[in-house]
Image (tube, grey):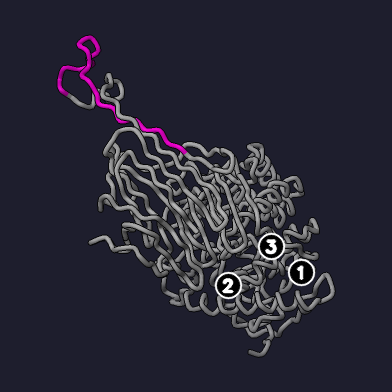
Amino acid sequence: MKRRSFLCHLGATASSLPFLPYPALTLAHPPYEEIALLLKAFSNGNDVSIKSLLERQEKDTKHPEYGGIVNGYGIHNPQNTSSFLQRLSGGLVSEYSEFYQDESLLEPMLRASEYLLQAQHPDGTIDLHTTNFHSTPDLAFSVEPASLAYTLLHTYVPSSTQAIQDNLQTYLESAGQALSIGGIHTPNHRWVVCMALARVHHLFPDPAYEARINEWLREKIDIDEDGQYTEQSTLVYSPIVNRSLITIARLANKPELLDPVRRNLEMSLYYIHANGEGVTEGSGRQDKYQKGTLHRYYYSYRYLALHDRNPRFAAMAQFLENQDINLLNYNLAYLLEDTDLKSPLPSASSLPTNYTKIFTGSDLVRIRRGERDATILAKNPVFFTFFNGEAALEGIRLASAFFGKGQFEGESLEQDGDKFVVRQWLEGPYYQPFAKEELKTTDGDWEKLPRDERPQSEIQKLLTEVRIRETEKGFQIDVSVLGTDRVPVALELAFRSGGTLEKAQPVENIPEAYLLTEGFGTFQSGKQKIRFGPGRAEHQWTQLRGALDKLDAQSVYLTGFTPFEHQLTIE
């Protein structure tokens, strides 16, 4: 596509006034080849997104959602529409984009900006149709891409996009008023709201915005001694918090907020599986047990690599670029907005690939030896994971049919010499009748006779203990379930679907469920294998009462009865 001239002005429809040129994008530093290649790659990926998004814009002028972008459910919404504006503004001003100075983008952008005003409630909020309505937090998420779009248009095409800018300014100022008084739901929402307020205040200053930022910041950043945020959301919310804090630090002159980001980024260097995926086992949000990379951290690693001249962060930024550049193209607008991000990275050091790291705040241990890595967890139904390259044992869980509450979840994580230990104590009582003088009702209403206030008897007890020790080739796991006898036990080894299992026997009527009756089994994915065993199958009941549903994986079970003691080898 050839570069076309822009129209000088947009009203209700495009006009034919002559083009007023603007200078090509300039770098604050010499155009180093690596930066040019990076901008080209981001622009190419952004162009692909632009084409897809244009197909999803409502073009029916009679439709009540005219100009909006639909999500995967076919619902027009301001979140996708504000991202649409960010994408198109990036293509419009990037000299590496095939949409650079392309007048055909102006009409869709104008209609999208008009849709945002239509979707915004009189109180300044918007809806997230999947769950939240009149939502301040979701408004904050939409403010970032809308602010980026406004900034790029105002900086590089001020006259040609004035109508779009005016709409965005109205949207952002109304949003600022809502954000300065509205509430939140989750810990990360506070910092996303503050980030949005910092952006609006930077563009359209208002003392109320700054006051609200300071009011939220009085609660202090929710980060523990490990560098972990409250939600422990590796793939989703931790990188959002990092980007939010950097933005507040940068635009609201609060450099102290960079310190928690540094701590989280340092910790996250150890939250990478040997196959390059992020460690999600400990997450408290929807990314728990999900597979994905750390590509959302790219902005933060690049920003602080340059700001601090940090060689480890530079190495991580380069790792993410080399891992999958296509996942990073949404960063184009950030690099166009902040020219400092287009500086060459400092010389990179190596990333950690041989370590044992104990994260006490998260009750989690990370162990990596080159292509092998493992996670040990307490306070989590999954107490162990193991990756050998592409071969992934995504989790080991243990359950017993003990009064409907036998899903093992270690109460604490301890180190005992060369072993890590997780334990769980359970009691299963029976309940006696109330004494006559303690009866609170005589009408037979069970709800008025609280079970936890009754005398207990015949109390059954169960102690489950798991001891994990690293070996030369992998790990040795000693499982002990003792106390009440003849309690059914099932140990689940959940291997990632798509690999090849050998020696395990299918369980009847349960897809992707297997028993290892004896000896050792193997799981292979790509060229890597995991060897596990020995097997044990004293019964065929794998979905025990009180246990969590089977994981979405190829699950191999070892079964038995208490007293249950078994030494499992994983290598």
Q: Which mark is residue 342?
A: 1
Q: Nearer the viewer, residue 24 or 6?
A: 24
Q: Choose the circle earlier in sequence order: 1 or 2.
A: 2
Mark 2 or mark 3: which is in front? 3
What residue sits 65% from the left and 46% below the top? 227
Q: Label 3, secondary structure: give it.
A: helix
Mark 1–mark 3 Cα distance, whole angstroms, equals 16 Å
Find disc 2 in the rendering and name its residue: 110
What residue sits 55% from the left and 75% below the top? 49
Q: Quadrant of residue 534?
A: bottom left
**Residue 531 picture location, percent across and down:** 45, 62
Residue most extreme to the front: 519
Is residue 235 visible in the rendered structure shown here? no
Label 2, residues with CA under 10 Å away: few <14, some 14-19, many ≥20 = many
Q: Label 2, secondary structure: give it.
A: helix
Mark 1–mark 2 Cα distance, whole angstroms, equals 29 Å
For this view, does 170 lie left or right of residue 499?
A: right
Highlighted range, magenta: 423-444
**Residue 181 picture location, percent across and down:** 58, 43
Task: Confirm whether the magenta stretch covers residue 424.
Answer: yes
Residue type at mark 3: give it: Met
